[in-house]
Image (cartoon, rainbow, N blue to C red):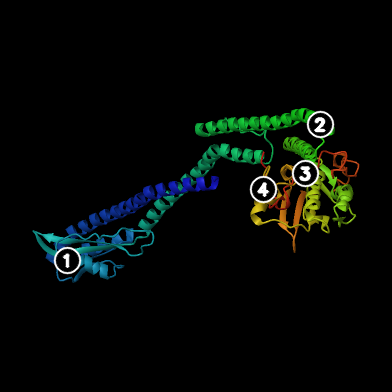
Amino acid sequence: MRRRLVISYLLLMALVLVALETPLAVTLANRETDRVRADRLADATRFASLAGPALRGGGTGQLDGELASYEKLYGISAAVVDREQRTVAVSAGYRSSPDTELALRVALSGQQFTGTESVWPWVDGPIVVAVPINDGGEVLGSVVTTSPVDAVRRAVTTWWLALAVIGLLAVLACVLTAFGLAGWVLRPVTELDAVTHEIAEGDRSARVQHRLGPPELRRLAAGFNHMADVVSDVMDRQRAFVAHASHQLRNPLTALRLRVEELGPSLTDAEGRAEHRLALEETDRLAQVLDALLTLARAEREENRLVTVDAVAVAASRVTAWEPLARRRAVTLRLTAASAPRYALTVPTAIDQALDALIDNAVKFSGPGGAVTVDVQPDEDGVTVVVGDTGPGMTDSQLEQATERFWRAPDAQNVEGAGLGLTIVAVLVDASGGHLTMRRGEPRGLVAELWFPAAPTGDGHPTGDGHPTGDGHPTGDGQPAGKCPPAGDGLPDVEGRPGPRKPAAT
């Protein structure tokens, strides 16, 4: 933008210079030419006064000497002709030309000839001036002079060069002023752009200096800071509300479940026991929703503190933790990654929770006889964790909605889950500086790819926060012990798994 603004200033300055200097240059050339012509006209008139007696008496001795001296002194040739255009007196350097012939004809008609064209730096022809020789109103002959244009051309060129230098100095001053002015005007815009990117990348404390630039941009910067403060406060309040509400609802929910359980022994008919079982299942599902909301609120409050994690070790731990549940559901779960460590930079437990969500989802929807594969691969400047299954897969439109909060596929409404698992995964991956990509597998199924930036060279060991959590053994409900319910508890059914990475809602 600064370059375009400076170019616009320069274009305007160039137009002003052209509009001012072009007429001035033409005026200078005309003035210099007219000055020389007026001087030559005076000289020719003097020669005409001397030539009158010579033409009447026939003696030209004094006239020849005057013309010779004039040419020798000034380098200007001249000639005197009678009314029949016969040469009466001529200097040694005089040469006849079409211009001199025209000038003589005009002078013999009783008019002065000074020409019409100005002398320009590229003009080579001489300046021709002719005057008639009168005697009592009768034209006896004419005097013509031819002057070289070198001196006039040098003078005009000098004036034009001076104008060009003045124009260049003006352009240089305009450039310096334009850069300073553009910098002053655009500095708030540049800072606003940088702060906007910082906020978009997660630094909600970034603000714009509101005392830079013109008053309009200062008001814009102050308004932006106020807006950022309001949005940040609203987000904090929203997340705090979700976290507090989820936490506060757990106690009455636990009490409600206990009371529902105590009703069990008093139910004797089969229909009542079935309704009692369904009530217990709904309370469990509500508990899972509250756990997922609490996890999401904590993930979104994460300040993007990155730790170094061995993705291969974490993947092996999660495969081991979910393998008993996969066996019970007749699903083959295996890790195909190499044994060499692959270190990635993530927020704490990002890979753990992401793999819990994706493996739980894959095992849940692959069905008996299905297969789930977990792999860890180096990928340019990062590490890619891949989870693939042989389930039914999803359509493209469902892939687009899969990471939305509480979204579930139409044919998966009755499967357990809150619809928040993938939102949590998306937030954690995004906070780690990575991205989540989902695509359909071949010939069927779904492939989830998590890309994380690689740890810097030399950072060879994971930190304490990077170790897998839990004891590595799933509990009876298919969730690894020692952890919150895996993020996969909120995964949409079948088509409800994530599609191409979308920004997580906050």
Circle 2: residue type: Leu
Report how far apart the C-alphas of labels 4 and 2 lie in the structure.
45 Å
Distance from disc 3 to disc 2, alpha carbons, whole Å, reads 27 Å
Q: Which mark is residue 502?
A: 4
Task: Quote the CA–CA distance across marks 4 and 1.
Answer: 110 Å
The amino acid marked with disc number 3 is: Asp
| Residue 144, position as x, y percentages in the image | 23, 63
Separation of marks 3 and 1 at Cα, in angstroms:
130 Å
Residue 309: horizontal and vertical position, in percent? 84, 45
- Mark 3 or 2: the one toward you: 2
Q: Is residue 241 visible?
A: yes
Q: Which residue is rendered at x = 50% and y = 48% of the image? A: 7
Q: Which mark is residue 263?
A: 2
* Residue placed furthest toward the front: 269
Q: Quadrant of residue 211?
A: top right
In primary-sequence order, the first of circles 3 and 2 is: 2
Name the N-terminal-most of marks 3 and 4.
3
**Discs 1/2, front:** 2
Q: Which residue is mark 3?
A: 489
The answer to which of marks 3 and 1 sits earlier in the sequence is: 1
Q: Residues within 10 Å of mark 3 (few under 14, many from 20)?
A: many
Q: How far across and how far down the image is residue 362, in percent?
A: 79, 52
Q: Position of residue 218 (x, y in %)?
A: 54, 32
Look at discs 4 and 2 and give the one toward the viewer. Answer: 2
Q: Residues within 10 Å of mark 4 (few under 14, many from 20)?
A: many
Callout 4: SS: loop
Q: Residue at x 74, y 60 (%)?
A: 441
Under mark 1, the amino acid is Gly
348 vs 418, nearest the viewer? 418
Say which residue label 1 marks.
59
